[in-house]
Image: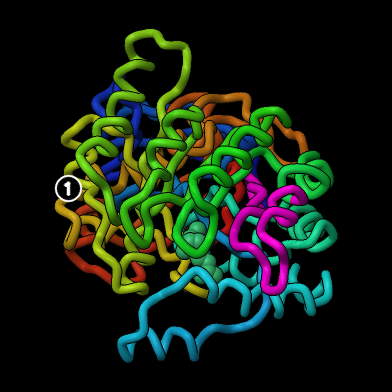
Amino acid sequence: MTRSASLLIDNIGELTTNDDAGGGRLHDAAVLIERDRIAWVGAAADAPAADERVDAAGRAVLPGWVDSHTHLVFAGDRTAEFEARMAGEAYAAGGINVTVEATRAATDAALEANLERLVAEARRGGTTTIETKTGYGLTVRDEQRAAVVAGRHVDAVTFLGAHVVPAGADPEGYLDLVTGPMLDAVAPHVSAVDVFCERGAFDEAATERVLAAAGRAGLATRVHGNQLGHGPGVRLAVGAGSLSVDHLGFLGEDDVSALADSWAEWSGGSGRRGTVATVLPACDLSTRMPLAPARALLDAGAVLAIASNANPGTSYTSSMAFCVATAVLQMGVTVQEAVRAATLGGAIALGMERDGWRDPKGAEQGAVGVVAPGARADLQLLDAPSVTHLAYRPGMPLVQGVWRAGRRVV
Ligand SMILES: N=CN[C@@H](CCC(=O)O)C(=O)O
Ligand SMILES: [Zn+2]
């Protein structure tokens, strides 16, 4: 859709800004967008003139969702695995190889068409920033093409060659490949490296090797950790200064404090950002695993993100509203905390909470997850008077309008 030079969204009943300077929320507010950025935020009574005006009629406006964890480059379907799980079978990392086989067999065009379909679906749900991972190719060629295809459609691409050891491969040889030639081939197309630190995937020593190789390549890191059981994922992620550690269904007190301490040290001037605790409520439900302890993480002082983990195996949904509602109804967080975690929390997990980050095409972008002057103009308008309705009316299609970089996309 087209973009006017300036657009005023006026008469907003409740505006979530995540801008702590102003209390994070305004009532009877307006937002002025100029080109791709937010130019002004304030009381509707003081709103400046603009080329175009949208009347929010007292409804709620908030930042577009920042989905900091997805796996959208894939082919194939895992309905049968889901059915078996709902009949009582446990989720195991090995299911990933079913998608790997289908993905390798797919053409570039088929992979891209599926990715475009999924990104469009996410946009309709209010998502304006998307990270996605490789990890269903697991050969140099297939991981590289996944990264290239993803870079055309999402805001951040993460290399997940260390997803599982592909069927038939020798674990040591595969680790050499992932930390050597595969990383070299994919590095120009990604901003971070992820590793699935879990039984059936990569153990502590292997995870350390992947994180060290990423550091040598100058890439940020993330870890899939503590998903299927207690383990070293959180400790390794915090130790390596990873941007985030994701899943977190099985945490000890030491894990919770390590995540909280990483931010206390940052506030104390350590010079190293903390590690975001990213919870994935839809995945916890779809795998019938314990819900991550989001309340305890917040109480301890951790920085929380909520993401969809959209993928064909453990969480085939990109609905951030569903994740927010689940976090509120089942994980003990308030609506405001959940909305913040699904917007600003995701932005921090991606290093995008400040202006000047670069997208996969190299273009400089404004901050996401906040509504403040200079931020990228990523907003959603709800057909509801407040964000509370996201949990009060779960499952209802409340998204009425979405603007991404100043352009109306829904
Ligand atoms: N845990 C590892 N990776 C994905 C699952 C991928 C799959 O099962 O296909 C996840 O985040 O849940
Ligand atoms: Zn994942």
Q: Is residue 18 above or below residue 397?
A: above
Image side of residue 215 versus residue 207, left or right:
right
Q: Position of residue 171 (x, y in %)?
A: 66, 59
Of 102 and 49, nearer the camera is: 102
Q: Is residue 140 left or right of residue 293?
A: right
Q: Tell me if residue 26 can be seen.
A: no
Mark 1: amino acid: Thr
SS at circle 1: loop
Residue that extends furthest to the top in the rendered view of this protein: 269
Task: Give the camera-side residue of 117 and 188.
Answer: 188
In reply to whether residue 132 is colored magenta, the answer given is no
Q: In the figure, residue 275 lies in which quadrant?
A: top left
Percent position of residue 252, x then y = 23, 44
- Does the magenta portion include 158? yes
- The spot of residue 288 in percent (x, y) is 29, 73
- At 16% across and 35% down in the image, what residue appears? 299
Q: Is residue 164 visible?
A: yes
Which residue does the numbered mark 1 point to in the structure image?
334
Please provide the residue range marked out in magenta: 154-177
- Quadrant position of residue 174: bottom right
**Crowd around label 1: few <14 · some 14–19 · many ≥20 (10 Å):** some
Q: Which residue is pictured at 50% across the width and 68% down the height? A: 93
Tag count: 1
User: Based on the displayed image, in which of its 4 quarters is residue 24 positioned?
Assistant: top left
Residue 361 versus residue 174 in the image, above or below: above
